[in-house]
Amino acid sequence: MNTKWMSKGNCADTNPDAFFPSDGVGVEIAKSICESCPVVSLCLEYALTCRINHGVWGGCSERQRRRIRKERRQLRPAA
Ligand code: SF4
């Protein structure tokens, strides 16, 4: 999977610990950094595809990504 976009993210020059917060305030701070990130969509899709369960990726918390994955599963046509 192509990860060249990672170097263009707002977090490239930020302490990575900021994206693995231990409380809700930390999550909001990380999400605010993602808000103006030029690769936010790529980052979110990467985290969803790779099933990354920890941290803030693509402007979404762990809980938000779980919800998106669940919604996508429900939208999938039955085989
Ligand atoms: S969306 Fe957030 S976590 Fe992803 S590359 Fe941008 S700043 Fe980093």
Image (cartoon, rainbow, N blue to C red):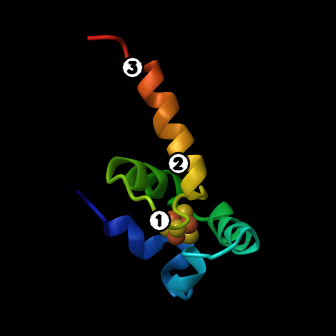
Q: Which residue is mark 1?
A: 54
How many numbered tags mark residues here? 3
Query: Residue 72, position in %: x, y?
Result: 46, 29
Query: Residue 48, position in %: x, y?
Result: 41, 48
Q: Residues within 10 Å of mark 2 (few under 14, many from 20)?
A: many
Looking at the rendered image, the quarter that the C terminus falls into is: top left
Query: Residue 25, position in %: x, y?
Result: 76, 72
Task: Give the number of the disc on residue 67.
Answer: none
Q: Residues within 10 Å of mark 1 (few under 14, many from 20)?
A: some
Query: In the picture, residue 32 is in which quadrant?
Result: bottom right
* Mark 1–mark 3 distance (CA, rounded to whole Å): 25 Å
- What secondary structure is found at the residue carrying circle 2? helix
Q: Nearer the viewer, residue 2 or 50?
A: 50
Q: In the displayed structure, does residue 46 sit left or right of residue 60?
A: left
- What secondary structure is found at the residue carrying circle 3? loop
Amino acid identity at mark 2: Arg
Residue at 62% over, 65% down: 34
Residue at 32% over, 68% down: 4
